[in-house]
Amino acid sequence: SAAVSASSYKGKESDKIANMLINLLLGNKTNNADNNTTTISQKEEKDPNTTDRGSPLILLSSSALSLHRDVRKACVSALILMRNKGAIPPLKLLELFFRIMSVVPDKSLRELLYHHIVNDIRNINKKGKRDEKVNRSIQAFLHRVVSMSQGGAEEQTAVAQKRAIDMTCELYRRGVWTDDRTVAIVSSAVTSTTNNVMCRAIRFFLNIEEKMAEDKQREEDDEWDGVNTIDFHKHSRKTKTRKRHVARQVKNRIKAQKAKEQPDWLEMEENNDAEGIKKLYPAIELLRDPQGIVEKLLKRMKGSNSTLKHEVKLLMMNFVTRIVGNHELLLLSLYPFLQRYMASHQRDVTSILAYSVQACHEYVPPEEVYAILKTIAHNFITERCSGEEMAVGINAVRAICARVPSVLSTEGGGDGTTNSVSMDIEGFVRDLAAFGKHRDRSVSIAGRSWTNFIREIHPGLLQGKDRGLKGTALHKSGTKPLPYGQRMAASGVEGADLLAAYEAQKKAAALIKKNDGDEYDTDDESVGLGEESMNDVDQKEKSPVDDDDKTTTINEDSDMDDVESDKAPKLVLMDTDGKPIVEKDTLDITTLNPEERDKLKQEVSSNRIFSSAEFAKMRKLVEREKRFKRDPREAARRKRAIARGEDYDVDISSDSDSEDEAIHIAGAVNPTEIMADSKRKRQSKAERLQSILTGREKFEFKTHGGGSTNTEKKRGKNFLMTKYSLAARIKRGRKETLKKANLREAMSHDKKKRRRRI
């Protein structure tokens, strides 16, 4: 009856019914529904301190808890129906439903309320009708619930906080709320005293981008599968409607194929609306106070009376190091804390090493990084450790030095040692490079990876025999990392000079091609004119014309040839001194010194506006320039191509980036990246002999490869199952036929015997 009344009345009557149902769910005693229309929001306005204590917002009266579950569900369904018709504001029901979810132990009702709130907020934020005022009020309520103190109802408050976090994370994942206010709601739960609430908030920041990317990929795959499946009606009657249906499907497939193959920057230019050009930043980048959050979490982890589980502490380490690495924060007390857990016998030590790599960035002082490197070297990269431990240690050192290349700089001290920490960088690098010849396969792979890394960053630290061809070329060019505190100042957009040179070469090549084409066209025209003149001559020989007319015709043709052979003079531009101005068709930046290249880069960057396609070209040109610098043979091939005038043939726009299909999150380090390479180790003589003996035993008695045969399966079946089978009936028929044949043969034989006796 409440649902029928809710759908039948509007205005004041609907408000009376809604207030009656709300008071019934809250357990408020009302004698007259007309007089009592006080809502939850009005009560909160009268007593604004009720939310801070936590208990009045969560707890319900005993009469509300004693309400029958069917009556409660009917009242909730009626209120949801009224909300769907727009008779009740969203915040009014949100507060009520949160009280019911946190207190009432009815799982089906909680799921119903949870899905209704999420879908209601999604409908409020549909494209074209986004209500920011309602969003702010709902977000403010959720923020109060999450940051609410425990008070006297710890269990109910924890349930409400978990539901609020789940709703916020779900709305962020669906792309409904992706602003900094949503991130602030979840960040307030990171410092919660309830471990379950804190872990949910931390997992949101660590995994939300990966989940959103997976959802997007799944949607694209489903959409492509739906478009790719075309019903051509091969086995049905070909009507006009079906032909139009097939044509429409083919058109949609071609459109989807073009959209799938076009680059991302072109898709951004097509979406010119506000929602299309809005960039979704990672949630961890939108934190308002990252320094305060990491300090609070680190203090909680380092507490002496901390009762955190090992899994929870690892989760907190991952979150703190990710924030420090992404925001480039200085938290010097973090690195000694991580060194406590850097031991080969430590549980999940590979993950701890990966988190240590996450916490390193270019603003970390070298003293802290040297301490980590020495700890890893003493505990992992020694002969007393196993091969897998040594490989993990070398890979971890390589990842740390890749993030902080200033630790490899030797400009602090003259002999390769730093002033503040006694660590011989050159000797450390060469010791690790010597592991490239280790007997263990995984250790040798890690050692060669370290050698290749040093060849590109600072080849001067290696011995001459270990530098290789590329390392020697980079060493001659003076490649080395900058010391701590120094950065290379950009003089313009990176790659602008390369783009200018590339465009000049392409323009010159097009001009040469055009001139060659004009010459070919003139030759073809002359050949055509010659054929036409020969035809005219033949026709004139056949026609009866006088000799005088012929001579006059020939003279006129020769005059026309002289006129056509004359060409227009070429105009030459002159300067003020009367000298001709020479136009530069090509720009060779290899002949420019660094100062001239910086000047050219500044000039090009300040005189033009680059498009997305030009930025992509510049990135590829810079990558090609670095490749030429690393490989001397590639540079030699480029010089020969420039000498032949073929350098412009390299089409930058058609190059495809070799991107990994796996989802990569910025700043995250996967523990599998520093693990030992899973290669088969060399077997000793005893192990080889054991494998030989095992192989002999295996092939001594040949067994059937695969499962059992049909004959073997028949043997295991019940007799009643196979009694009336086709094979059994045929077999029985054969037996009876054979019996009759034997009987006839025996009877005929007996007849022959009796004849003889007679």
Image (cartoon, rainbow, N blue to C red):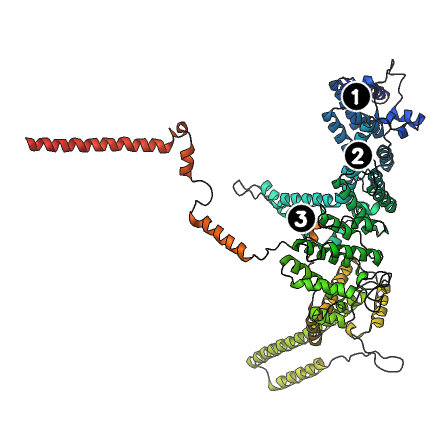
Residue holding disc 3 = 256
Which residue of the protein is positioned furthest toward the left in this rendering?
A: 758
**For the residues bearing labels 2 and 3, Cβ distance under 8 angstroms:** no
Residue 257, position as x, y percentages in the image: 66, 50
Q: Nearer the viewer, residue 735 or 173?
A: 735
Q: Earlier in the sequence, mark 1 or mark 3?
A: 1
Q: Residue at x 75, y 21 (%)?
A: 73
Residue holding disc 1 = 6
Q: How many marks?
A: 3
Residue holding disc 2 = 121
For discs 1 and 2, the disc positioned in front in the rendered view:
2
Residue 587 at least partly seen = no
Residue 139 at least partly seen = yes
Disc 1 and disc 2: Cα gap in Å?
21 Å
Residue 560, position as x, y percentages in the image: 69, 81
Q: Nearer the viewer, residue 217 or 341?
A: 341
Disc 2 and disc 3: Cα gap in Å?
31 Å
Q: Nearer the viewer, residue 687 or 15?
A: 687
Kind of element beneath mark 1:
helix
